[in-house]
Image (cartoon, rainbow, N blue to C red):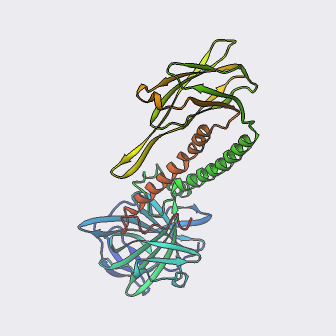
Amino acid sequence: MKRAESESAACQSCRALLDLSQGTLAVAGKLGKRTEPLIPLGSKGVLRGEAVEVLGYLRRFTEFAGTRYPWSEWQLAGDKGYRYLSEYNGHFTWLAPIPAGAVVGDPRDEGSVRSGATRYAHYQTGNAHYEDIQGELSWQARVNSTVKVYDFVDAPHALSCEEERAELNWSRGEHLDAKELWTALKLPGAPPLPVGVGMAQPNPWLSARVAAARSSLAGFFLLVALGIFIGTTLPRQRAVALDVPLINESVALSDEFELPEGSQSIELDASADLVNGWVGLDLALISPATGEARALELELSHFEGVDDGERWSEGSRAVRAVLGGVARGKYLLRVEVSLDKSSASALPKLAQVTLTRGVFLWTPFLLALLALLPAPVVTTLLASSFERRRWAESDHASGAGSDEEEDE
């Protein structure tokens, strides 16, 4: 394993922090109460294709509004140099140091920075203090020192910057599944259950949202193409044109006609040149062979006048209804008239009723289009909810700093 000389070490027995930078042992400070690391020192394994060994352990914390927020870190020696593990609330991040020149932007601005083609949004800034140190470290640690820590995120990746004595040290990290870590290092027991959403935890709903959007878009074009095909191939032929005398309780009956297609839709239109009148039409599509009838009611009305010098009108002189699933066969159309007696004298003599076969049903088509919406809408809401929970732990609790979706 590629490894430089350690510059700090902690004595397990006397809890002294030792400075090794000068080639001799010098006490640099006294450590407090020892904590038990989740990952023991000396653990070895192959992680992300790299042989690693755990050399040192840190327990650190920041404090906001009187509340302490602790997290754990481990330094590992790997084939390509030092690596780091960070754990907070059961969420792990795998980190490697990068040159300061690999990052464009000043972390102190607490906006966003770039590394390569990726923009990382500022997540949080805090003063990090040491709570515990164990094992060996590659830098000079000071018990009472304070390090400024800046975290930036583009899940599942993250950038972390530590500022001490005006020196900036950058690391690039990636969310690491705890089960993968436990397997790689052959750790006993089960990993801790994560709490909440981690800073760099991948949003599991983003891929579902994309898949749902693609499926819905494909379904939309398929339905539109199918609707155009059906709409242009349906015959749409007038089968009945019936003049109905507007006499109260009178009945008009069409000649027998044939509907040749099976399970088709028909359109019934009624109209009359009404002025301040109302007409009710009870229609029945009757099969002479079976005696079965399908009934519906249509109302025609039109009223108008002048109120405070302004002309008004309401009602409709023409109405339409559609019946679906009409079987092949011969039929009669029966129309019974109901009139408003107060306006019967002012009504025209006739109403016109037509029946058109082979029409396109818009309602099922529109319902089918609406059925495509829930999947992308629900997955978008779930993805947004996940992001809100992620950013609720940051310095941008409103979520305004989240750029995951933009950089997707």
Q: In this view, does 65 lie to the left or right of 251?
A: left
- Residue 275 is situated, as x and y percent measured from the top left of the image, at 48, 38
Q: Which is more toward the observer, 138 or 305?
A: 305
Q: Which residue is drawn at 40% across and 82% down?
A: 108
Task: In this rendered view, identify the residue nearer to me: 192 or 106.
Answer: 106
Residue 402 visible in rendering: yes
Within the image, what quadrant is residue 335 found in? top right
User: Going by the picture, which residue comes out furthest to the top?
Assistant: 290
Query: Can you say which quadrant of the picture contains the N terminus?
Result: bottom right
Task: Please identify the residue farthest to the left as the structure is shown.
Answer: 66
> Residue 30 is drawn in which quadrant?
bottom left
Tally of numbered discs: 0
- Residue 316's spot in the image, x, y percent? 50, 39
Is residue 47 shown left or right of residue 144?
right
Residue visible at 42% across and 53% down? 194
The answer to whether residue 329 is visible is: no
**Toward the viewer: 137 or 359?**
359
Above or below, 364 against 75 in this view is: above
Q: Where is residue 166 in the image (x, y as percent from the top left)?
A: 39, 87
Which of the 4 image quarters holds residue 242?
A: top right
At a point 75% along the width and 36% down the height, the residue shown is 235
Furthest toward the front, the residue is 345
- Frontmost residue, 329 versus 30: 329
Q: In which quarter of the image is the C terminus?
A: bottom right
Residue 39 on image: x %, y %: 45, 60
